[in-house]
Image: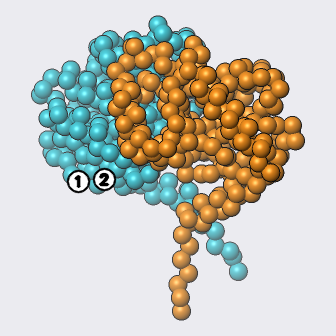
Chain colours: A cyan, B orange
Amino acid sequence: MTIKVLTMKEDILGANDAKAKANQERLDNLRILTINVMSSPGAGKTSLITNTIRKMPSAARIAVIEGDVASSIDAERVQQLGVPVVQINTAGGCHLDARMMAEAMDNLPMEKIDLLFIENVGNLICPAEFALGEHKRVIILSIPEGDDKPYKYPLMFTEADVILVNKSDLQPYTDFNVDAFHKAVKGINPKAQIFHISCKTGDGFDDWLKWLRAEMKAKKGKS
Amino acid sequence: MTIKVLTMKEDILGANDAKAKANQERLDNLRILTINVMSSPGAGKTSLITNTIRKMPSAARIAVIEGDVASSIDAERVQQLGVPVVQINTAGGCHLDARMMAEAMDNLPMEKIDLLFIENVGNLICPAEFALGEHKRVIILSIPEGDDKPYKYPLMFTEADVILVNKSDLQPYTDFNVDAFHKAVKGINPKAQIFHISCKTGDGFDDWLKWLRAEMKAKKGKS
């Protein structure tokens, strides 16, 4: 008699991928460009999103899904800007998954959105393993975290479409080596685009917004 | 007929707790003060450990267990100081567990150690759920991460014995509110000791080292 073996991790990820695909089809049908924003705690995910909302034309219809272990601090910051926002609390969970994403979308005015930001749980490891249905993955690495992070957290950096190096205003006070960081990224993910920004001063946002507008245009143009 | 229900998460944690207890008995028998150091990526765990080794009397016999998803960058930094070190790579795993800890101890000269640092994987969520056998939990929160982290990552801050607020040299360039941070910690963990330090300048190390020496003395004094 054959012994039945349940490989739980594979099963769970398999189910997540199917759900993520369904989410993406829903987003594609509505032509909503969807961006999964991931980083360590405190690297600047909410600041990126709120600054981007402020700098985008008011005609761009933006919404946000906020993921946190606990609290609704970030959702409150976003709501003050008058955009639709849903907060997911994972109650200890270290990442968002596609089921949470589907439920969050059910609570947003999906017919009235062009650009959807997902702010994942602050964690440089687990969120990279769970597709949500997003079109692009944007990783934020803040200068004080150090230039060696691509070596230590390779999956997150390997799967990034864009890497935003935030808190460039703190660079003069740290030993962050820009060349070493770019070399580390190129070694594992040569296609990733890297933009240096400061959410505090606004430096570097032009290139990031240019990339974002081009992606939104491409998404709208697709049938 | 009763249905058999396997609650996997509880079982896994239960097994981990038993193994952690065995680890702690082993450490108690050898009177090795063992400290589990946890933080976000890049908050300064390795810098804390290397600076502490440099500032402690050479008679203090220190060893280090390094936990990382990948790479041995941190272990190399520690090894340069001439102390015994073991690197654990979790191959994607987001925290150390008691089994890994037991195996690491098997690879250290346990009879010749007074103080053992465990540098956990850089993650402000999952490591807090897994006891390793440590006597004390030290959390590092770096100034650029922001003062709201106790609200967002409550378990980590609730279970800390000591909270080290690192990178105090960057404080003038951020909007970190010290009073707000202390208030947030007091609300969930009034017993935690908070020391402000800078691994870069050495500021604040006196109080941290005083605490450490007192704990080592207490551990040696116990039968």
Residue most toward the top? A172
- Residues at marks 1 and 2 touching, judged by CB atoms closer than 8 Å: yes
* x, y percent for residue B148: 36, 34
Foreground residue among B1 and B97? B97
Residue A31, labelled with which disc?
Answer: none
Could you say whether the residue bearing mark 2 is in a helix, strand or loop? Answer: helix
* x, y percent for residue B43: 53, 27
Q: Residue at x 42, y 17 (%)?
A: B171
Residue A106, labelled with which disc?
Answer: 1
What amino acid does circle 2 point to?
Ala
The quarter of the picture where the C terminus of chain A appears is top left
Q: List the residue tagged with mark 2.
A: A102
* x, y percent for residue A113: 18, 39
Q: Residue at x 45, y 58 (%)?
A: A15
Foreground residue among A35 and A165? A165
Could you say whether the residue bearing mark 1 is in a helix, strand or loop? Answer: helix
Q: Quadrant of residue A201?
A: top left
* x, y percent for residue B67: 66, 38
What amino acid does circle 1 point to?
Asp
